[in-house]
Image (cartoon, helix red, strand yellow):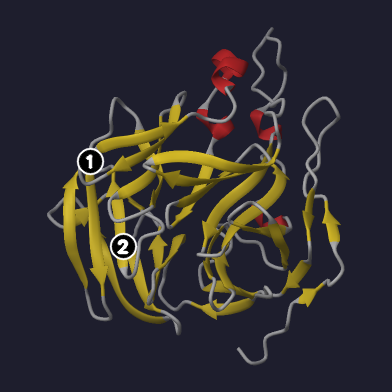
């Protein structure tokens, strides 16, 4: 760590234009002003266990990697943090008792608690992790409601969770008590794309990534250059600020023989591809690449950092591409990997924010 190449920090105020557009009538140009840009070189952290990385999750004293290999017998691998000493795997794959089929991790859990929902067995489970074992402390049934599946589960306090419930053509952003299965509040999607796109609408067009901390939350849109910041006040979800597009772009749609649109959805641009946060800042993984044209390992990755009120703080330009990441805000380190190329190591990026 001592020989880490320091990031280059531009002291002057830089106007960073982080959106490009196909033409003036296709989408809105977005300009974001960041006080600084940091160009950061990755430090590689070797992972000796044979894992096909599918997710990374940080707890207080542990870092967890998910194995997405079809041949995997166990879903999660637990490492001591900091230090990355491998401790043990858990959540075996299978149909038997204490086995799982399709676990989706809950983000923003507190301390050393780790939760996930399993659609394969309709289970919601919470574990307490230690250096030597994981202890199941809660398990309940969690069946999908009317064909709507949970996506992007984030914990906001002891019992409340932010969840996107969706199917292919309908979605809703909900605040739910998962322990009582009570719906507390909902907010609609920002753009009425169901009405705008009609029969061409799919929930992918307004899909979001979610992050939360102490009853604050943020949404980053996959195909819209937009971040939303909000808070939970008196059990109500309130959007407090938006950064980016004020109206939805004119999407590329799949063409049909003889139809109006002779286009392809893969010509749309992917903007935000991940979101995480700490107590002070929100970290947004920004791509701005054409969905179908550029492999994820051949683009420049930016991480936009904002305060919780939506004020730009700094822009990180990473020398290695990542598709999934977590942040140690106290040590000011980003850990990430690339789905396509990372199987033996994680990337660590040391950044700097003046307090």
Within 10 Å of disc 2 (Cα), the crowding (few <14, some 14-19, many 20+) is many
Secondary structure beneath dot 1 equals loop
Mark-to-mark CA distance, 2 and 1? 17 Å
- The answer to which of 250 and 190 lies nearer the viewer is 190
Considering only vertical position in the picture, is 102 above or below 268? Answer: below
Which residue ends up furthest to the left in the rendered image?
97
Residue 242: % across, % down: 64, 42
Quarter residue 258 falls in? top right
Q: Residue at x 67, y 52 (%)?
A: 286
Quarter residue 87 falls in? bottom left
Whether residue 11 sits left or right of residue 146 in the image: it is right
Residue 102 seen in render:
no
Residue 189: % across, % down: 52, 30
Whether residue 48 sits left or right of residue 149 in the image: it is right
Considering only vertical position in the picture, is 273 above or below 189? Answer: below
Residue 66: % across, % down: 39, 62
Q: Residue at x 59, y 75 (%)?
A: 332
Q: Residue at x 66, y 74 (%)?
A: 351
Which dot marks residue 114? 2
Q: How many numbered badges does the structure rendering display?
A: 2
Considering only vertical position in the picture, is 28 above or below 60? Answer: above
Residue 6 seen in render:
yes
Q: Which label's residue is closer to the chain start, 2 or 1? A: 2
Quarter residue 143 falls in? top left
Q: Which residue is mark 1?
A: 142
Q: Quadrant of the C terminus?
A: bottom right
């Amino acid at each position: 760590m001592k020989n880490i190449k320091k990031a280059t920090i531009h002291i002057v105020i830089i106007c960073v234009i982080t959106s490009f557009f196909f033409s003036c009538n296709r989408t809105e140009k977005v300009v974001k002003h960041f006080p600084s840009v940091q160009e950061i070189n990755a430090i590689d952290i070797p992972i000796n266990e044979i894992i096909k990385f599918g997710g990374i999750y940080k707890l207080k004293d542990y870092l967890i990697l998910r194995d997405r290999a079809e041949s995997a017998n166990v879903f999660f691998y637990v490492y001591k943090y900091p230090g990355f000493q491998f401790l043990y795997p858990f959540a075996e794959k299978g149909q038997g008792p204490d086995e799982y089929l399709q676990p989706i991790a809950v983000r923003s859990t507190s301390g050393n608690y780790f939760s996930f929902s399993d659609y394969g067995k309709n289970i919601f489970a919470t574990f307490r992790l230690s250096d030597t074992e994981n202890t199941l402390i809660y398990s309940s049934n969690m069946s999908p409601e009317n064909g709507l599946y949970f996506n992007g589960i984030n914990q906001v306090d002891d019992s409340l969770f932010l969840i996107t419930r969706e199917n292919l053509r309908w979605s809703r952003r909900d605040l739910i008590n998962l322990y009582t299965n009570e719906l507390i509040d909902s907010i609609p999607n920002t753009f009425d794309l169901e009405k705008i796109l009609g029969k061409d609408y799919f929930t992918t067009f307004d899909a979001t990534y979610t992050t939360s901390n102490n009853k604050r939350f943020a949404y980053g849109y996959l195909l819209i250059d937009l971040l939303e910041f909000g808070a939970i006040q008196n059990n109500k979800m309130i959007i407090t600020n938006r950064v980016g597009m004020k109206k939805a772009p004119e999407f590329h749609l799949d063409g049909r023989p003889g139809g109006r649109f002779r286009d392809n959805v893969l010509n749309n641009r992917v903007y935000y591809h991940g979101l995480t946060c700490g107590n002070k800042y929100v970290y947004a993984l920004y791509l701005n690449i054409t969905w179908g044209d550029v492999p994820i390992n051949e683009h420049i990755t930016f991480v936009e950092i904002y305060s919780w009120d939506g004020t730009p703080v700094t822009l990180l330009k990473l020398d290695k591409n990542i598709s999934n990441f977590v942040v140690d805000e106290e040590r000011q380190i980003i850990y990430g990997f690339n789905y396509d190329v990372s199987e033996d190591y994680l990337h660590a990026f040391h950044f700097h924010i003046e307090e």
